[in-house]
């Protein structure tokens, strides 16, 4: 299918493959914050909650009591945040390296799990007290005890799912599922090369490719300890990255055939060296640039090797094809409920240690996901 497989077919595909299916002193135009509460009599409720606040680029976050002065809109939901994933974009924004000019003060965090506290007048699918996970990439603010999210960016989850798992699930597994299933159309006879395989997105791709689609997975990572984790997650082989012999190692593992799918979220030299491993009519999924080095790929490179270069962005699907965006979230939750995937959380930090959590990720000490425990 030219447009890729719909995610609604996922359950059938799995079945056929043999699986079981303070009050803060803040002056700003940001509506999250206000000093002069008496000047805003039209708001229905005023309450305070803790948040990790950035006041200046490249400076530590400060835990403050923030005053809520915003009445939620018709399709918005206010949630009590219990956990929030710590992601590379949080660090890049706080360091002024994300390519956008961020207004201050700013509360990072977009991958949240919690319970519904208040719903807008036109919200149809949620009730107060529901356990939910959400993605808020249109404003962040997840490193806080409260967060307002649009209904279209929330998914209900079973009460039995822990808050820690909830905050580690949607962004990485959703992106990996879109890339592998819809765009690359992965099958059991594929060999998949995953770069940065011990990271949050990489490990999700390994988990899906190996354990849901039963493909042969080769993981590439930075240390032997991480390589061991990738093998435990289901990879057929895990290689420590060395540019000079990556192709030789991959060809050795694949019997000289190369790999039919590359899933890359690193960019830079890793991406360039990985391209040397692609097989005839292979597919290269570009899912991110963790190295912050965006490779330039000349179109002349595509012709002699006859492979496809495919971009994938969960955020883009949110706006371009919201039905698929919603479905991929549902599918990821279903896969977890069926026991087919298992997110790996390497560290959990309390809100008070938010700067340590971000440094832990920045220093590449993490594997899988890093979670901030808010409550």
Image (spheres, rainbow, N blue to C red):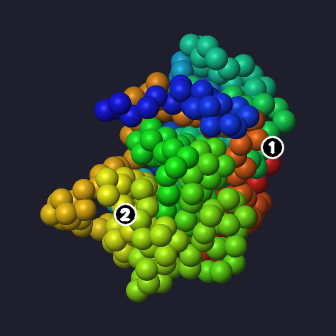
In the image, 353 versus 254, the foreground residue is 254
Q: Hey, which residue is sitting farthest bottom in the picture? A: 244
In the image, 128 versus 323, the foreground residue is 323
In the image, 307 versus 349, the foreground residue is 307
Residue 72's x, y, as percent? 57, 26
The reply to whether the C-beta atoms of the residues labelled 2 and 1 are less than 8 Å apart is no
Residue 22's x, y, as percent? 71, 51
Q: Is residue 187 left or right of residue 354?
A: left
Position of residue 167 relative to residue 302, above or below, is: above
Q: Is residue 232 left or right of residue 186?
A: right
The quadrant of the rendering that contains the N terminus is: top left
Residue identified by numbered label 1: 162
Residue 329's x, y, as percent? 58, 34
Q: Hey, which residue is sitting farthest right in the picture? A: 160
| First in sequence: mark 2 vs mark 1 | 1
Residue depicted at x 69% and y 28%: 156
Position of residue 285 relative to residue 154, above or below, is: below
Residue identified by numbered label 2: 278
Estimate how packed mark 2 is, as few (under 14), some (14 to 19) or many (20 or more) residues with alpha carbons within 10 Å: many
């Amino acid at each position: 299918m030219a447009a890729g497989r719909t995610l609604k077919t996922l359950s059938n595909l799995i079945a056929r493959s043999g699986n079981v299916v303070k009050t803060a002193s803040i002056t700003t135009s940001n509506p999250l914050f206000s000093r002069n509460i008496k000047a805003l009599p039209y708001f229905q409720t005023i309450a305070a909650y803790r948040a990790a606040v950035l006041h200046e680029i490249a400076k530590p976050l400060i835990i403050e009591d923030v005053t809520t002065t915003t009445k939620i809109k018709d399709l918005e939901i206010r949630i009590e945040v219990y956990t929030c994933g710590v992601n590379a974009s949080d660090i890049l924004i706080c360091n002024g390296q994300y390519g956008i000019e961020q207004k201050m003060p700013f509360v990072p965090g977009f991958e949240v799990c919690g319970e519904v506290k208040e719903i807008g007048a036109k919200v149809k699918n949620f009730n107060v007290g529901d356990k939910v996970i959400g993605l808020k990439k249109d404003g962040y603010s997840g490193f806080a005890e409260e967060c307002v999210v649009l209904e279209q960016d929330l998914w209900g989850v079973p009460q039995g799912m822990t808050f820690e798992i909830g905050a580690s699930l949607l962004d990485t597994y959703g992106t990996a599922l879109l890339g592998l299933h819809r765009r690359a159309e992965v099958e059991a006879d594929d060999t998949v090369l995953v770069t940065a395989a011990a990271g949050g997105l990489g490990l999700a791709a390994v988990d899906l490719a190996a354990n849901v689609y039963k493909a042969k997975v080769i993981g590439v990572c930075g240390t032997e300890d991480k390589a061991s984790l990738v093998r435990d997650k289901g990879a057929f082989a895990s290689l420590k990255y060395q540019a000079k012999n990556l192709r030789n190692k991959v060809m050795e593992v694949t019997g000289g055939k190369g790999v039919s799918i590359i899933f890359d979220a690193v960019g830079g030299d890793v991406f360039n060296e990985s391209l040397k491993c692609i097989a005839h009519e292979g597919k290269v999924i570009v899912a991110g640039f963790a190295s912050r080095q965006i490779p330039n790929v000349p179109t002349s490179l595509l012709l002699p090797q006859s492979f496809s270069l495919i971009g994938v962005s969960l955020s883009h699907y949110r706006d371009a094809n919201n039905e698929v965006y919603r479905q991929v979230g549902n599918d990821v939750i279903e896969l977890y409920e069926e026991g087919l995937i298992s997110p790996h959380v390497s560290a959990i930090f309390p809100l008070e240690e938010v700067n340590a959590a971000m440094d832990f990720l920045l220093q590449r000490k993490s594997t899988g996901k890093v979670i901030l425990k808010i409550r």
